[in-house]
Amino acid sequence: MIKLIMSDMDGTLLDGNGCLPEEFGEILTELHKRHVIFAPASGRQYFALRHQFADYADDLLFFAENGTYVSYHDVELFSSPMQPAMVSRVLNLAEKVPGVYPVVCGKKGAYVTSRNDGFFAEMEKYYTHYQLISDFAAIDDEVIKVSLCDAQQADAEHNIYPVMKPLSGRLQVAVSGGYWVDVMNFGINKGIAIQQVQKLLGIAPKECAAFGDYLNDLEMMSSVYYSYAMENAHPKIKEAANFLAPSNEEHGVMRTIRMMLDKKMI
């Protein structure tokens, strides 16, 4: 029986307008009746996720910032702060990429040093708690991730990732969307965070399901048995997943969970 369900947000749980499916509350109620935990697993910051799920936040487990921060009932279960020297190295490399805007992500909030309308329009989708500061060196926070935004061309996979790839031996570099590359501690990703939670809660991979669509969901697919790639997913995610779900526009996550309920898999 499935006891824990993880879902990515953009391109997965949310529709094309960034909205939760209308039936989400109803499905969540059914899961609670069966003592099943639902967990958003996203590159978004923790505060943004709680804001998005304001009506349900107290009942959800959150995998925020691509697994670098995990919280349940507003209690931290797991985090992976970066060394300041590694944060500086990422930021120094980012300066070599024209039109790239860094977001330094801490436990207390996010930090930016540049204001640009296109960048802010994209950044504010994922970060509700942020500060505009003059210098990243002034940050007084535990940094858990650096996100790099390709606000001009929205092609982070080709414009940012190749520049950051040399760091892959020491840091985790993940393409998390058309605009974004996320850099975290080496070996930290959604999949590793899920494994930590499985150990803490005593839940086996065969008792877990996960839904994803993009490259930052890759490790998540191998951390559960019921791994679902969305119909609209990146080809590599479809290759890695054990199952296929309808697209996010078709509310594929909700439809698949409903199928699980009907078949008494939950």
Image: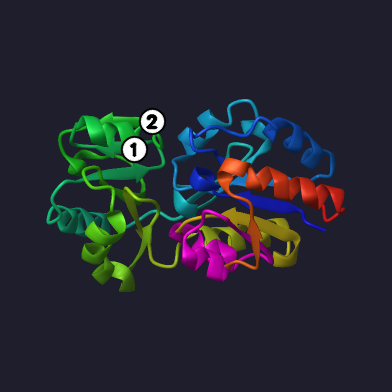
Residue at image point 48% right, 39% down: 46
Residue 208 in view: yes
Indicate the amino acid at tag 2.
Answer: His
**Residue 105: where, in percent of width, then height?**
35, 44
- The numbered dot on residue 15 is none
Residue 76 in view: no
Q: Is residue 238 found left or right of 206 in the rendered image?
A: left
Q: Is residue 42 above or below residue 46?
A: below
Distance of mark 1 from mark 2, alpha carbons? 6 Å
Indicate the amino acid at tag 1.
Answer: Ala
Q: Residues within 10 Å of mark 2 (few under 14, many from 20)?
A: some
Contact between marks 1 and 2 (CB within 8 A): the answer is yes
Q: Is residue 224 found left or right of 262 in the rendered image?
A: left
Question: How was this image coloured?
Answer: rainbow
Residue at image point 83% right, 56% down: 265
Give the image quarter of residue 1: bottom right
**Residue 132: where, in percent of width, then height?**
23, 30
Q: Is residue 11 above or below residue 234?
A: above
Residue at image point 81% right, 45% down: 35
Q: Nearer the viewer, residue 47 or 106?
A: 47
Q: Is residue 133 found left or right of 173 in the rendered image?
A: left
**Residue 149: where, in percent of width, then height?**
27, 46
Give the image quarter of residue 162: bottom left
For this orientation, the residue located farthest to the top is 55
SS at mark 2 in the image = loop
Residues in magenta, as a range: 215-240
Q: Is residue 219 magenta?
A: yes
Q: Which residue does the numbered mark 1 point to in the structure image?
A: 110
Residue at image point 38% right, 60% down: 174
Q: Residues within 10 Å of mark 1 (few under 14, many from 20)?
A: many
Q: Which residue does the numbered mark 2 point to in the structure image?
A: 129
Give the image quarter of residue 56: top right
